[in-house]
Amino acid sequence: MPDYATLDIIADAYNPILLLLTLYATAASICMKQWRLAGTKVLLILIGAIIAYGWMLVDSHYGIWPSMGMDYSTHTATASVMAIFLFFFLKKIRAAVVVSLILYIYLMLYQEYHTLGDIASTGLFVCFQYVPALLISTFHFNKKKLD
């Protein structure tokens, strides 16, 4: 088993890798001149960032998670948003996205960054906001495409 420092480097690389894949998925739409889809993807990236980092700021100000004996996991929030984005838009790597997210959660637990309660509460909280935004945005994109 790699040492703590090596695992820490791997954990620190996970979200940037997801971000690169997210940007790749958006750039692919731009290269194919799918302007409306590219715009939808950019909007969804911004919405995801606002949800993940916005709640981080709200929690740091109001102490929502600490009041329940937990910690808001920004790493979980951003990873969840990008994994959902990639699952939806890069269908060829869906299985890899799911497996990688599960392994990342396991790694965060193993490294004792967060508890399972921190990760589950943050992940579910963010997902319940991001998934509807994604579905509404893509529905709007598909509706416009049909008009």
Image (spheres, rainbow, N blue to C red):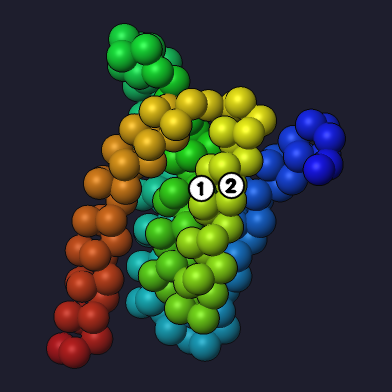
Q: Is residue 127 left or right of residue 35?
A: left
Quarter occupied by residue 64: top left
Above or below residue 16? Residue 28 is below
Residue that label 2 marks: 104
Residue that label 1 marks: 79
Q: Which one is earlier in the sequence, the residue at label 1 or at label 2? A: 1
Above or below residue 23? Residue 28 is below
Neighbour tally class for label 1: few under 14, some 14-19, many 20 plus, Cα within 10 Å: many
70 or 24: which is nearer to us? 70
- Residue 11: percent from the left, percent from the top? 68, 42
Q: In this view, does 46 lie to the left or right of 19?
A: left
SS under mark 1: helix
- Residue 110: percent from the left, percent from the top? 63, 34
Q: At x 29% / y 38%, what residue is drawn?
A: 125
Does residue 146 appear in this view?
Answer: yes
39 or 60: which is nearer to us? 60
Q: At x 25% / y 46%, what residue is drawn?
A: 128
| Residue 136 numbered tag | none
How many numbered markers are drawn?
2
Badges 1 and 2: C-beta atoms under 8 Å apart? Answer: yes
Amino acid carrying label 2: it is Tyr
Neighbour tally class for label 2: few under 14, some 14-19, many 20 plus, Cα within 10 Å: some
